[in-house]
Image: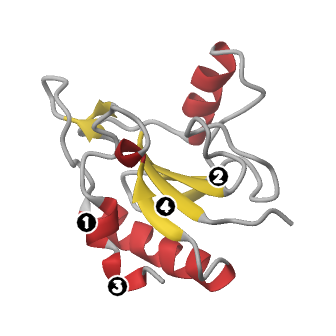
Amino acid sequence: MRKITEIIIHCSATQEGKDFTVEDIDRWHKAKGWKSIGYHYVIHRDGSIHKGRPEEQVGAHCLNHNKHSIGVCYIGGLSQDGQPKDTRTPEQRAAMRALLVKLKQSYPRALIMGHNVFASKACPCFDAAKEYQDLQP
C-alpha cells in the first residue's frame, strides 16, 4: 500500500454548467500520452462520485507529488467566459466533503491541499486547505 501524505484537489478547467465525465477526462489524459485518467476520483456536477485510477496506483495529477497523494477533481472551474472560478454546485460541495471525510478515515495524516499550492495555476479555484481546515491533522 502506498503511503499517502496529501489529498490534492483539482478542477477539470471546464466551463461552468457543462457536463463532462470520467471517460472524457480519461480520453483527454490518454491524448497527452498518459496511460489513463490521472485522478483517483472525479465529482460530477450532480454530486455523483466516480472512480478514476485505483488508489493503489500512483496518479498523474500533480508534478512531484503523485507518488504519495490521492487526486480528487470536480467538473468545472471556469466561468462562462473561461476565467478561473469556483463553479462547484451544492451537490459537488456536499459530495467532495463526504469523499474527503471518507479518505481521511483511510489516510488520517494526509493534508488536504489545492493543486494551486504546488503549481502556478488557479486550480481548483478555491482555497482547499482553508475550506477543509476542520479535516486537517
Quarter of the view holding residue 113: bottom left
Quick check: 17 left or right of 123? left
| Structural crowding at the residue carrying mark 2, measured as other residues with C-alpha within 10 Å and reported as few (<14), some (14–19) or many (≥20) | many
Query: Which of label 2 and label 4 is nearer to you?
Result: 2
| Structural crowding at the residue carrying mark 1, measured as other residues with C-alpha within 10 Å and reported as few (<14), some (14–19) or many (≥20) | few
| Structural crowding at the residue carrying mark 4, measured as other residues with C-alpha within 10 Å and reported as few (<14), some (14–19) or many (≥20) | few
The residue depicted at 58 percent of the width and 40 percent of the height is 22
Q: How is the image coloured?
A: secondary structure
- Label 1 is placed on what type of residue? Pro
Whether residue 75 is visible: no
1 or 78, nearer to the observer: 1
Q: Give above or below for 127 relative to 63.
A: below
The residue depicted at 35 percent of the width and 43 percent of the height is 116
Residue at the outermost left position = 81
Query: Which of label 3 and label 2 is nearer to you?
Result: 3
The residue under label 3 is 134
- Label 4 is placed on what type of residue? Ser
Earlier-in-chain disc, 1 versus 2: 2
The residue under label 2 is 40
Query: Which of label 1 and label 2 is nearer to you?
Result: 2
42 or 32, nearer to the observer: 32
Q: Which mark is residue 90?
A: 1
Q: Position of residue 84 (x, y in %)?
A: 20, 35
Q: Position of residue 77 (x, y in %)?
A: 28, 40
**Mark 2 → mark 4, Cα distance in angstroms:** 14 Å
Earlier-in-chain disc, 1 versus 3: 1
**Mark 1 → mark 4, Cα distance in angstroms:** 12 Å
Whether residue 36 is visible: yes
